[in-house]
Image: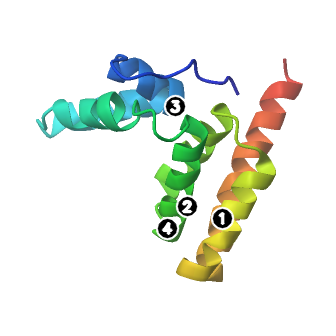
Amino acid sequence: MTKPANIRPGDDPARVSEALVGRTRTRLLNELFDFFELPQEAVDHIFGNLYTRDVLTQRERELCAVAALCVLNRTNELKSHVIAAVRCGASKQEIAEVILQMSTYGGMPVCIDGLAIARDVFDKAARDNSSD
């Protein structure tokens, strides 16, 4: 997985989204917003304002997202943000530790589901790297 370029305030929201969650997820967000005629400003706010703030590193921000999505049991988004966390430099051990910590707040079933999702992400990355 490639590491996203340094993300800064004022960066293009579409570029930030693609760097963090990938083209496929960015395209899905845009398609959903278009289909439901929702304002693009909502997505622009997330990737143009929130994700470009420089208080937290992108790695820290993604680890926070992994924690929140794990405890909320939002599996599709969790997968995207595990990928983004890796792209931002988070290690397999850090991601596992964050997910394990969430067993305190969401219970072991949420933790186990989160670890399984993270394992799938790392397994896919390993398969992709071995085919290069």
Spot the residue most to the right: 130
**Eye-nearest disc, 4 or 2:** 2
Q: Can you identify the residue that label 1 sits on?
A: 99
* Contact check, label 4 and label 2, Cβ < 8 Å: no
**Label 3: few (<14), some or many (≥20) within 10 Å?**
many
Q: Nearer the viewer, residue 77 or 100?
A: 100
- Above or below residue 117? Residue 60 is above
Residue at which label 2 appears: 67
The answer to which of marks 4 and 2 sits earlier in the sequence is 2
Distance from Cα at disc 2 to Cα at disc 3? 16 Å
At x 55%, y 37%, the residue is 57
For the residue pair 113 and 60, the one nearer the viewer reads as 60
Q: Position of residue 82 (x, y in %)?
A: 61, 46
Q: Earlier in the sequence, mark 4 or mark 1?
A: 4
Residue 10 vs residue 65: left or right?
Answer: left
Residue type marked 4: Asn
Q: Residue drawn at (40%, 30%), measured in percent from left and top?
A: 52
Q: Secondary structure at mark 2?
A: helix
Q: Is residue 98 left or right of residue 125?
A: left
Q: x%, y% of residue 97?
A: 73, 62
Residue kind at label 3, given as amino acid type: Leu
Identified by mark 1, the residue type is: Ile
> Residue 20 — which label?
3
Where is residue 100, by image quadrant? bottom right
In primary-sequence order, the first of circles 1 and 2 is 2
- How far apart are the alpha carbons under marks 4 and 2? 10 Å
Tell me whether circle 1 and circle 2 mark residues in contact (CB < 8 Å): yes
The residue carrying mark 4 is 73
Looking at the picture, does residue 40 appear above or below residue 92?
A: above
Colour mode of the rendering: rainbow
